[in-house]
Image: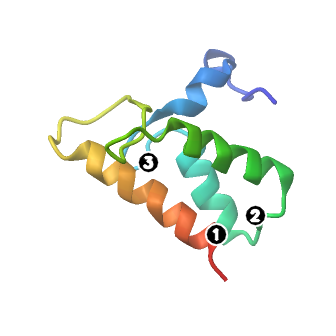
Amino acid sequence: MHDKYTDRKSKEFWERVSFPFLYTSIISALDSVYFLGFKRDNPQIEKALELLREKQNESGDFDLKITRGSDKDLNYWICLAVCRLFKRYCTK
């Protein structure tokens, strides 16, 4: 499914992240729909979580493109946001 904004139609934009959330990305979208009550049994959510699993590297970080921010620890904040998603969706 394409984003309605013409400058963000490519799927690659879902892998461009920022923290705090600025643009819609895979992380911000999953964070939002969790609080709207969507669960992991939704096939699209499972697909998104699998994409994040595939993006995790040996060090535990995620190979996602950070689009904004100059904080030297920004990658850790992104990692924390992803880990919170897995805790929310994958426990219970």
Which residue occupies the extreme front position in the image?
58
- Going by the numbered disc 2, the residue's amino acid type is Arg
Q: Which residue is depicted at the point 56% across and 63% down?
A: 86
x, y percentage for residue 90? 64, 69
According to the image, label 1 marks what residue?
90
| Element on which disc 3 rests | loop
> Marks 1 and 2: CB-CB under 8 Å?
yes
Q: Which mark is residue 40?
A: 2
**In which image quadrant can residue 89 be found?**
bottom right
Distance, label 3 to label 2, CA atoms, is 22 Å
**In which image quadrant can residue 48 be found?**
top right
Label 1 Cα crowd, 10 Å radius (few <14 / some 14-19 / many 20+): few
Q: Quadrant of the C terminus?
A: bottom right
Q: Which residue is depicted at the point 47% across and 54% down?
A: 82
- Going by the numbered disc 3, the residue's amino acid type is Phe
First in residue order: circle 1 vs circle 3: 3
